[in-house]
C-alpha cells in the first residue's frame, strides 16, 4: 500500500496543479479536504474523476466521498479494496 500512497501523492499534485507542493508534503494521515493543501469541493471532483479513470473505482455519493477523502491513507485503502485490475 505504500507504493499506492506514493503514486497518489504524485497524481494529486498533477491533477490539482499544486504549485510548490512535493509528494512528501502530503502525509498519509493528514486531512485532504480542508487541510493544509487547501483542497475544496471543486478539487474533490477532479480527484474523483482521476480515481475513477485511473483505478476503475466509483465514488458515487457525498457520504462515501467524505470518508474516502478523509486522508490520503483512507483514499489509498479504499482504492486498494475496490480497484478493478486492468490486467483482466
Image (cartoon, rainbow, N blue to C red):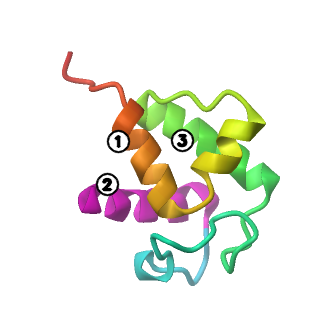
Q: Which residue is mark 3?
A: 50
Q: Which residue is mark 2?
A: 4
Circle 3 SS class:
helix
Q: CA distance from mark 3 to mark 1?
A: 15 Å
Q: In the rendering, at what x and y percent does residue 28 appear?
A: 45, 70
Q: Residue at x 54, y 80 (%)?
A: 21
Which quadrant of the view contains residue 84? top left
Query: In the current view of this chain or complex, which residue is farthest to the left?
Result: 87
* Of the image marks 2 and 3, the number of the one nearer the N terminus: 2
Q: Is residue 26 above or below residue 17?
A: below
From the viewer's side, name the closer residue of 54 and 71: 71
Name the N-terminal-most of marks 1 and 2.
2
- Tally of marks: 3
Quickly name the residue at label 1: 80
Q: CA distance from mark 2 to mark 3?
A: 14 Å
The boundaries of the magenta stretch are: 1-17
Q: Where's the C terminus, which quadrant? A: top left
The answer to whether residue 71 is left or right of residue 36 is left
Residue pictured at 50% horizontal, 72% vertical? 29
Distance Cα–Cα, label 1 vs label 2? 8 Å
Amino acid at each position: 500500500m505504500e507504493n499506492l500512497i506514493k503514486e497518489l501523492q504524485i497524481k494529486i499534485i498533477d491533477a490539482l496543479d499544486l504549485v510548490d507542493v512535493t509528494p512528501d508534503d502530503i502525509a498519509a494521515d493528514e486531512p485532504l479536504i480542508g487541510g493544509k493543501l487547501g483542497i475544496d469541493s471543486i478539487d474533490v471532483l477532479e480527484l474523483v474523476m482521476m480515481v475513477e479513470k485511473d483505478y476503475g473505482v466509483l465514488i458515487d455519493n457525498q457520504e462515501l466521498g467524505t470518508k474516502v477523502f478523509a486522508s490520503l491513507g483512507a483514499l489509498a485503502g479504499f482504492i486498494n479494496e475496490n480497484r478493478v485490475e486492468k490486467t483482466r
